[in-house]
Image (cartoon, rainbow, N blue to C red):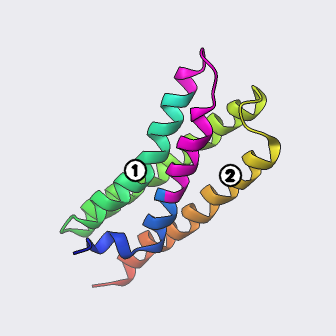
Amino acid sequence: MAFAFEKLLVYQKAVDFADSICQHTEAFPRGYGFLSDQLNRAALSIAANIAEGNGRFTKPDRRNFFGIARGSIQECVPLLELARRRNRVSLDQHTLLKDQLEEIGRMLAGLINSLDETN
C-alpha cells in the first residue's frame, strides 16, 4: 500500500533530485565531505518535509513543513554554486540540477497555494 504523498509528482521529483545529488556527491574527493554532507542533507530534506507535511492534519502544520521544504530548496542553491566553482559538478550538471530545483519549487508553491484555496 502506498502512502498518499508518494503519489504527489512534487514528492517524486524531490526524491529523484535527492538521488541525483547522492550520485554526484559520491564522486567528491576527500576533503569535500562538508559540502557533500550538507548538500545531501538539504536535498533529502525537500522530499522528507513534503512527506511529513502531507501527513499532518491541519493546514498550518502542512504549510509549515512545505515551507521548510522550500527553505531546503533555497539551501541547495549556494551549495550547488560552490560545488560548481570548486569543479565538483560541471556547468551542465549545475544547470540541470538548478532547473530541477526551480521546477520542484514551482510545484511546491502550487501545493502551498492549494492549501489556501481549500476549505
- Of the 4 image quadrants, the one containing the N terminus is bottom left
* Residue at 49% in and 38% down: 40
- Most extreme residue toward the top is 31
Residue 42 shown left or right of residue 49 in the figure: right
Q: Viewer-proximal residue, 67 or 31?
A: 31
Q: For mark 1, give the secondary structure.
A: helix
> Percent x, y for residue 29?
64, 21
Give the total of numbered labels: 2
| Dot 1 amino acid type | Ile
> Percent x, y for residue 99?
69, 58
* Residue at 66% in and 38% down: 80
Residue 48 shown left or right of residue 87 in the figure: left
Q: Please say whether residue 38 is one of the residues in the magenta stretch.
A: no
* Residue at 43% in and 65% down: 11
Q: Quadrant of residue 28?
A: top right
Q: CA distance from mark 1 to mark 2?
A: 18 Å
* Residue at 55% in and 54% down: 17
Q: Residues within 10 Å of mark 2 (few under 14, many from 20)?
A: some
Looking at the image, is mark 1 or mark 2 earlier in the sequence?
Answer: 1
Q: Which residue is mark 1?
A: 68
Q: For mark 2, give the secondary structure.
A: helix
Residue 39 shown left or right of residue 97 in the figure: left
> Percent x, y for residue 61?
25, 60
**Residues under numbered marks 1 and 2 in contact, where contact means CB atoms less than 8 Å apart:** no
Q: Main secondary structure of the magenta part?
A: helix
Q: Which region is colored magenta? A: 16-35
| Dot 2 amino acid type | Lys
Q: Residues within 10 Å of mark 1 (few under 14, many from 20)?
A: some
**In this view, 25 is above or below 16:** above
Q: Quadrant of residue 83?
A: top right
- Label for residue 9? none
Q: Which residue is mark 2?
A: 98
